[in-house]
């Protein structure tokens, strides 16, 4: 609601689509939202909770929703996260931690196929961001 009001206030409402939708339904072709081709689609804070095969389906949906030249960005906690054991056993916050190679493999299994994937880590090395551009 806040973002919608802000978009209206800034005169951007025609450039932003707000949809209450389950991303997993979208990835499985059961979503109701139809997007025009996008320049960028990003997911931060979601892939950490999903198994690889579901991420590949989500990447397929993202690929189909991108314009040629559009970029997909997916974030994930890194296997080098020094707090993983604390998160798992003390906080009971279990995530799928992944390596750069894991991220590249999932993109390779998706419709992105052999397109180059750039995986970057933030300065602390805890979070990874994978970038891939659709041709």
Image (spheres, helix red, strand yellow):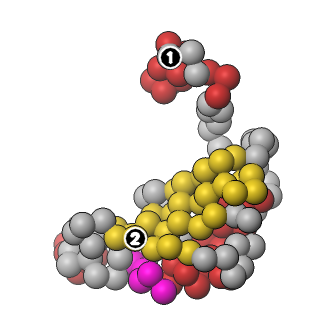
Q: Is residue 3 left or right of residue 52?
A: left
Quadrant housing residue 52? bottom right
Q: Quadrant of residue 84?
A: bottom left
Question: Mark 2 = which residue?
Answer: 120
Q: Residues within 10 Å of mark 2 (few under 14, many from 20)?
A: some
Report x, y in % for residue 15.
64, 28
How far across and down, in percent of the image, does residue 94 sit? Answer: 36, 73
List x then y, in percent, for residue 90: 19, 72
State the image quarter where residue 23 is shown: bottom right
How far is mark 1 from mark 2, CA to CA? 32 Å
Q: Which residues are magenta?
A: 97-101
Whether residue 73 appears in this view of the structure is yes
Q: Secondary structure at mark 2?
A: strand
- Which residue is denoted by mark 1 in the rendering? 10
Residue 57 in picture, x, y percent from top left: 70, 69
Residue 54 falls within the magenta-colored stretch: no
Residue at left 62%, top 21%? 13
């Amino acid at each position: 609601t806040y973002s919608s009001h802000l978009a209206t206030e800034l005169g951007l409402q025609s450039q932003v689509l707000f949809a209450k939708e389950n991303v997993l339904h979208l990835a499985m072709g059961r979503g109701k939202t139809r997007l025009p081709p996008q320049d960028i689609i990003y997911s931060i804070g979601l892939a950490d909770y999903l198994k690889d095969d579901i991420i590949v389906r989500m990447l397929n949906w993202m690929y189909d929703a991108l314009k040629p030249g559009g970029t997909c960005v997916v974030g994930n906690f890194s296997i080098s996260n020094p707090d993983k054991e604390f998160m798992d056993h003390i906080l009971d916050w279990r995530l799928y931690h992944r390596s750069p190679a894991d991220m590249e493999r999932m993109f390779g299994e998706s419709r992105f196929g052999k397109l180059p994937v750039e995986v970057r880590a933030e300065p602390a090395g805890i979070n990874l961001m994978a970038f891939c551009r659709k041709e």
